[in-house]
Image (cartoon, grey):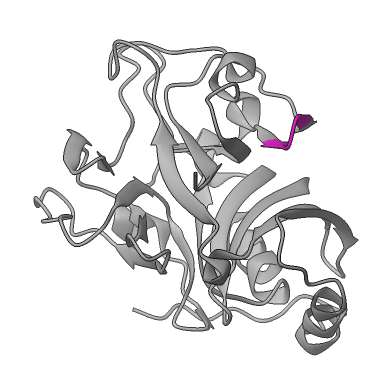
Amino acid sequence: MHVHFRAPPGYNRTVLIALLTLSMSADVRHQRITLTTAGVDVVTVPMSTGKYRIDVILPSGFPSSDEDFGSMVKRPGLVAAINGAYFDRNSKKPIGDIWSGGTLRHFGAMGTALCVSSDGTVDIRRVQRHKRVDWSAYETVLACGPALVLDGELDCDPASEGFRDPAVMGRVPRMGVGYNASGDLMLVRCAKAVTFQESAFVMLQLGCREAMNLDSGASSALWMKGKTIVPAGRRLTNVIGVFAKG
């Protein structure tokens, strides 16, 4: 289902993509960019180089435990990290499926999933609610959502994915993940308080072919190569990690 929205004033996707292209490199990089809609931090991972793999960092005792973000980013070989899926504050359980190391680590059956194949190919796909999915074709899967951009178009329908909590649906500074036409993974923090739909515009402006929302608020966290770009305001239960291949 494609849900279309009117672009905000000053929206200029072409200029932004050209600007980002000028700063492309074969290494993980962090950029602070001022868009027509908001200021953003972007960590870009060139997956096509074959130098990186994506995995989900989980605390000991998962899924009923949490861990300080500063401790989670000390995993060997880690070069970048961003907070992952929404989770229940009491049970610590994430809302969506998590697949890692050939094992379904958690069954949540809602939202939209970031899926990464063993060759580094990234995909983002909606999850059919309350249904089990065979994730064995992928190396790593983390489901959160809602979807923001699919197949190069704005496609944001939170209610259909089960999102109804007013605290989640309102305007907050948001975190997201996506990939562009080159297959580069993009870890994004929007510093301005925005809706899901406005966040979708941000991801499209950044050149994302597909993108999805991640947890935000006190869970917001972004790190690259020893530098904390966004410090977490609480202990976390799941984090998306970018690792250098040995």
Asked whether residue 131 appears in the rendered view, the answer is yes
Identify the residue shown where x is 36% and y is 11%: 65
Q: Which residues are magenta?
A: 223-227
Identify the residue shown where x is 65% and y is 32%: 221
Task: Count the marks.
Answer: 0
Identify the residue shown where x is 70% and y is 35%: 223
Identify the residue shown where x is 41% and y is 57%: 158
Residue 70 shown in magenta:
no
Reply above or below: 84 against 204. Answer: above
Q: Position of residue 74 (x, y in %)?
A: 59, 21
Relative to 126, 7 lies left or right: right
38 or 104: nearer the eye?
Answer: 104
Give the dominant element type of the magenta stretch: helix, strand or loop: strand
Relative to 75, 131 lies left or right: left
41 or 91: nearer the eye?
Answer: 41
Asked whether residue 171 appears in the rendered view, the answer is no
Reply above or below: 99 against 188. Answer: above
